[in-house]
Image (cartoon, grey):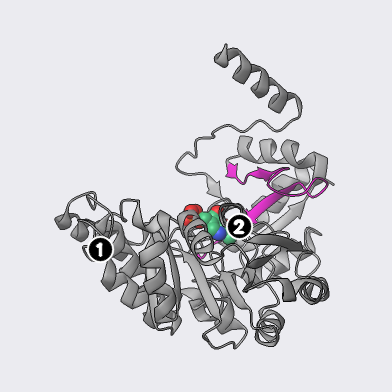
Amino acid sequence: MFREKLRKEIEIIKSNGLYRFFREKNDGVLDFSSNDYLCLSKHPKVVEAVKEGLKYGVGSTGSRLTSGNINHQRLEGKIAEFKEVERSLVYSSGYATNVGVISALCKKGDLILSDKLNHASIIDGCRLSKADVLIYNHCDVEHLVNLIEENWKKYNNLFIITDGVFSMDGDVAPLRDLKKIADEFNAILIVDDAHGTGVLGNGRGTLKHLNLKPSDNIIQIGTLSKAIGGLGGFVCGIEEVVEYLINTSRSFIYSTSLPPCIVEGCIKAFEIIEKTDIVKKLQKNIKTANRIFKENGFIEEDNITPIYPFIFKEKTVLIAEHLIKNNIFCVGIRYPTVPRGSERIRVSINVGHKKEDFEVLCERIRDVYQ
Ligand SMILES: Cc1ncc(COP(=O)(O)O)c(C=O)c1O
């Protein structure tokens, strides 16, 4: 009976064109889908550090508050230094970080103002919190101010939450304006810099890129699974935020901590970002891609991040299939991940791509899209 019910629902998903399924990524494909912007997941020094870390065993064996506090504080020290903040706390994923931080800090009687295009993990964190939530139009500072002016008197605390770099569009949040608004209305600004860390501000993130100094009312979140090339998430900011989260954040307290070998790999990845010109190389690649993608008419403006939305709407699936048949891995993104009418190929470039790779991508798209 239950099986039948689910089958029917799956049929509805299929008939709406929204069916999701796995694709295997073969070795040797030209990969424009991964978030491994600095190719650190396969960097020999990172791989070596992970192997070294196996001396601690494969798993961490418990939550950080039980048996699972191994080398994690060393990574947290590194992140705090890297982000120039007082303290950081590592979670088992970026998803768990957003859900755990937002649900712990934002309470009944508080108001969250969340950008319309924020990542699903922020949305789920907001849902799990007991705070009221208002959505402001994407990067629309005026709309945000209007919502605050209409509502702030009714609430104890205000939280403005935004991606630093938006995961599906690659654009950058107006953090300087958001910080000013946060200061004016005594709000806390939470920035999920999953796609800015390792990419902007010489790798330090979107705040650094915009010359914004960390301050008491800014909380930064990030992942270790994208430019850092590993797994996990982190939150960083003032000492008291971290101490409070250790004591209240359920996805931190009630979940096994990261494998210690991954922790070693992530520490090495941060060192590589600090000591080499890998981020500059990525930025150089972004400039090359900008030129080629513009010549082909796929973008109009220069990007500063490695995420390029090529909006092909209803042609998206056809183009994605054609690319895969031609050994180019570049997935189509559909509703509900992005709004209807903005279905796209999400092209993400990395430090390992060559000029010719960008050209081949454009040629293969042109086979089916004029
Ligand atoms: C903006 C943003 N935040 C959080 C996450 C979740 O991070 P993780 O994959 O480490 O769970 C993602 C990943 O898709 C993301 O794009």
Q: Give percent across and percent down for residue 248.
A: 40, 62
Q: What's the mark number on residue 89?
A: none
- Amino acid at the residue labelled 2: Cys
Image-quadrant location for residue 10: top right
Q: Helix, strand or loop at disc 2?
A: helix
Q: Nearer the viewer, residue 223 or 246?
A: 246
In primary-sequence order, the first of circles 1 and 2 is: 1
The reply to whether the residue tagged 2 has its Cβ within 8 angstroms of ligand 1 is no
Instruction: Rate crowding at label 1 as few (under 14), some (14 to 19) or many (20 or more) other CA atoms within 10 Å.
Output: many
The three-letter amino acid code for the residue at tag 1 is Ala
Residue 104 in picture, x, y percent from top left = 49, 62
Residue 180's place in the image compared with 145, above or below, is: below
Left or right for 72, reference 319: left
Q: Is residue 122 above or below residue 199?
A: above
- The residue depicted at 24 percent of the width and 49 percent of the height is 59
Helix or strand or loop: what does disc 1 sit on? helix
**Residue at 54% of width from left, 88% of height from top?**
213
Residue 250 horizontal side relative to residue 209, left or right: left
User: Is 210 left or right of 232, judged from the image as shown?
Assistant: right
Q: Which mark is residue 126?
A: 2
User: Compared with residue 120, is residue 111 higher up or lower down, i.e. above or below?
Assistant: below
Considering only vertical position in the picture, is 172 above or below 181?
A: above
The numbered mark at residue 49 is 1
Q: Which residue sits at x=19%, y=60%?
A: 52
Magenta region: 328-351
Asked whether, in this view, residue 25 is left or right of residue 160, the answer is left
In depth, the one of 187 and 97 nearer the eye is: 187
Say which quadrant the N terminus sits in.
top right
Q: Position of residue 239 (x, y in %)?
A: 39, 80
